[in-house]
Image (cartoon, grey):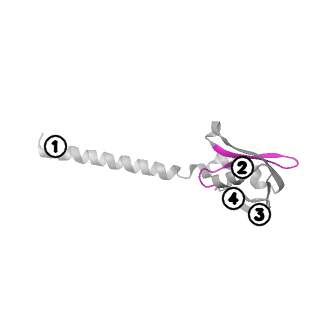
């Protein structure tokens, strides 16, 4: 092989590698906030968003291993039960701070919740309702 053929081959390899890196970067950028704004999670939490909670009680919290190891909290009002999923890494500390028997209150059309009238956390879903 002469130098021209070798240079052309190297140039083609560099261009292919550059395109691959750009594609991977685009995919990472596109799916970076996948957990926060998936339509499934937003539709699942819509009822909680639309509801004003007055004295909802934490029934239990756990890691739901079959469901992608999502940190999960079950709460109950006098008339209805709800399930909340916490966003990995962003809300995990909040879910770990909740205990069975804690009382949660929240206004309608918000994900901001007050626990035992002492501290507040917010489910960080970027939903467009």
Structural distance between the alpha carbons of marks 2 and 1: 59 Å
Q: Which residue is mark 1?
A: 5
Disc 3 target residue: 118
Disc marking residue 122: 4
Distance from Cα at disc 4 to Cα at disc 3: 14 Å
Please provide percent x and percent y for residue 15: 30, 48
- Please tell me whether residue 74 belongs to the stretch shown in magenta: yes
Look at discs 2 and 3 and give the one toward the viewer: 3
Q: Find numbered disc 1 in the image and state the secondary structure of the residue it sits on.
A: helix
Between marks 4 and 1 in the image, the one whose residue lies nearer the viewer? 4
Q: Which residue is mark 2?
A: 45
Question: Does the CB distance between marks 1 and 3 fall below 8 Å?
Answer: no
Q: Secondary structure at mark 2?
A: helix
Q: Nearer the viewer, mark 2 or mark 1?
A: 2
Range of the magenta residues?
70-91
Residue 73 position within the rendered picture, expressed as x and y whole percent measured from the top left: 72, 47
Looking at the rendered image, the disc whose residue lies closer to the viewer, 4 or 2, is 4
Q: Nearer the viewer, mark 1 or mark 3?
A: 3
Q: If you read the primary sequence from the N terminus, does the residue marked by circle 2 or circle 3 appear first?
A: 2
């Amino acid at each position: 092989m002469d130098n021209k053929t070798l240079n052309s081959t190297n140039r083609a390899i560099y261009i292919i590698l550059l395109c691959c890196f750009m594609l991977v970067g685009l995919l990472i950028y596109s799916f970076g906030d996948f957990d926060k704004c998936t339509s499934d999670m937003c539709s699942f939490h819509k009822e909680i968003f639309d509801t004003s909670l007055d004295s909802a009680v934490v029934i239990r919290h756990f890691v739901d291993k079959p469901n992608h190891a999502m940190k999960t909290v079950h709460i109950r009002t006098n008339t209805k039960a709800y399930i909340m999923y916490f966003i990995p890494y962003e809300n995990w500390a909040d879910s770990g701070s909740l205990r069975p028997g804690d009382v949660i209150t929240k206004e309608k059309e918000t994900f901001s919740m007050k626990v035992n009238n002492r501290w507040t956390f917010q489910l960080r879903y970027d939903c467009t309702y």
